[in-house]
Image (cartoon, grey):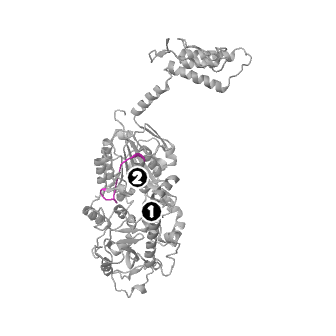
Amino acid sequence: MTSYGTESPKVSPRKVETIPPIQPLNGNHKAPETIEENGSFSLSPNRPNSVHDKVARLSIHGSDSAHKNLLESLKSDTNGPSFAPKRRRSSVQLTSQLNNNNMHNEILSRKNSLTSMKVIKKKKKMNAPMDLKVFENAYSKNISIKDLRDLTLFLMNANNNMPQWLRIKNRPIGLKMVVLFMPGLEPQDFQMPNQESFAKDLPYDNHYFLTGNTNTNLIENCQSIPVAAPGSRLSLFSAYNSFINVGLTKNEKEIKKKELSNKKVVITDLLMRLDQLVENGYPIHPTTDGLTSEDQFANREMKRETDDNISWYNTIKFDHSGSHIFGLDCEMCLAGRDFVLTRVSILDFQGNVIYDQLVKPDVEITDYLTKYSGITKEKLDPVTITLKDVQHKIIKLISSDDILIGHSLQSDLFALKLRHPKIVDTAVIFDHKAGPPFKPALKYLASEYLNIDIQNNSSDGHDSIEDARTCIDLTKLKISNGLWFGLSINTENLFVRLNEKSDKKSLILNDYVFKNFDLADENNGTNGTFSKKIRCFNDTEIYDNIQSHIDEFDICVGRLRELEFNRGYSQKPAKSHMIEDKSSDEIIRLCNERINKIYESLPVGSVILLASGCGDTKDFNIMMKEMNALNKEEKMEMKKNRNDELATAVAKARDSVVSMIVKTDPKII
């Protein structure tokens, strides 16, 4: 026997083979042997018009008339005469009946097939453009740089936690991102009066972008949002560092610690990479691993490593007996605004002093800083050894193949006017308890890990021999305990996270990395390049590199500096011939022009973030310069007396903005 299921307006009648009879639920009930063509049957033969049967018929027929009939029937049952209470079936028995009924539903009706409906919806969703909506409360509470970083991770499919301050529909799988930090942006650059602030006056649901931009498609898909730069009431932190450092969960920290603990450490594992040397302001030796002649020339110009009167020296390669690892520390005094060398101490890896010398500067000392340097006029007056004498001695003691250990050793090398390629910096291999970008003090490290108290003699000042020996002992402790020792392991590099979680490739563009640096090296030997760092000396190079590499990388992150220098938010590097002098209006005009080109070259669904990172830092910078010239006690007193003034300067410096642009098909607008 064959029968046909109920017709649906969109589905042809379906031929259904004879269905096996439903098994009786118990001995007192007998199931129908077949389902008739009209689909009528009874779950309860003794009560053919029970609600159970009506629900079952509705689920089988699924037609409008069936719905209507059932509703009328239920209504009449409710309003009609009362009947004697009937024995209720057990929930187990009812469930069994409904399950059997569902088997027939699947065969007889295709109208209620959720599977086919889901397929249609999914296909439609995949073809829809991404829709991004920022909620109004993002304007009242101000999002943070961390929020922008979390958004980046979400858009790059590195996590599935959508930020709470917006809604995103139809997130593309192959989305590309361009993130540009541009310190120096002010309200006047966004069609706002200059005296207004982003936090208080930026209107919700706006389409503001840089003044003068005429790309209607870009502007229609742009929204500018106030952002609170990282910091506190009395402090300001680096927005760029906050963006590229991802906080780790407790479980992730344990995994990282285990990975680092399993690796045997030798001292060469602690050597600073080229990008770390540059980022920490070290003078760069011409034989530094990975350095090109072009990079060396540019770095010399940026860091003022030449002087009209005093020549710089490079350590040279030569064979010698004895130790090939040395600890170095210097003491300095002030000559006007500059620090000058007044003592240098060098120890071998066993802690033996091999050179300790007071040095007579060729300029007048204005402050001996005795409390910190231990140097007095009486000690220095009889000294005849000059800086040049010290330089000649050191390059005969230390080969360029040897390793120098010190704490923030860049200051010592600048005082010595000396370049060396192999550096272990205890301020880098040990973390500050608050994490990057903060650096730990040597006194803290000595107390925390060596249980010794150094730099505590206020009358005699620091002892450079003691400091150098402390650095050597800390390095030995690090080697014996493993790479994890002394690290906070609280954060992970954003670009490492993007590669680990979603296999994304990143391009990093700023003014303190070198060309062709491979971030795979940073991940302890990861195979293949997942990130490239390119050093760019001006904004034009950043824009051009994004244009030329946009197809190779999933995300490009750049730090633009020209507006920041132009408006006095930061000091322009001296002798930097590669940064042209432009007016702020010209910088904004070029930014509009170049971002428009980048926007047009991106695939549909891509996102551009243009973030100021900070607000107006001029007042804050002035106060910080005054504080940095004071000792610790004087600095604390100044903070106390000028608390409100500092808080106002910080609030102004933290008032920043981000413009978020979603690339769409112009035809859709």
Q: Which mark is drawn over residue 447?
A: none
> Which residue is farthest left?
293
Can you say whether 468 is above or below 221 in the image? below
Residue at image point 37% right, 69% down: 410
Can you say whether 175 is above or below 374 in the image? above
Q: Which image quadrant for residue 324?
A: bottom left
In this view of the protein, can residue 614 be seen by the observer? no
Q: Considering only order in the chain, which callout, 1 or 2, is on the residue closer to the N terminus?
A: 1
Q: In the figure, is residue 43 to the left or right of 149?
A: right
Residue at image point 64% right, 24% down: 93
Query: Looking at this view, is 190 or 548 the one in front?
Result: 548
- The answer for how far apart the CA atoms under marks 2 and 1 are is 18 Å
In this view of the protein, can residue 567 be seen by the observer? yes
Query: Looking at this view, is 454 or 177 the one in front?
Result: 454
| Start-end of magenta stretch | 501-516
Residue 518 location (% of width, % of height): 33, 55
Q: Is residue 197 magenta?
A: no
Residue 530 location (% of width, % of height): 35, 51
Query: What kind of residue is marked 2?
Result: Val
Give the residue pinned by disc 1.
483
Query: Looking at this view, is 522 or 269 the one in front?
Result: 269
Can you say whether 120 is above or below 349 in the image? above
Residue at image point 32% right, 68% down: 421
Q: Which image quadrant for residue 511?
A: bottom left
Residue 52 location (% of width, % of height): 63, 19
Q: Residues within 10 Å of mark 1 (few under 14, many from 20)?
A: many
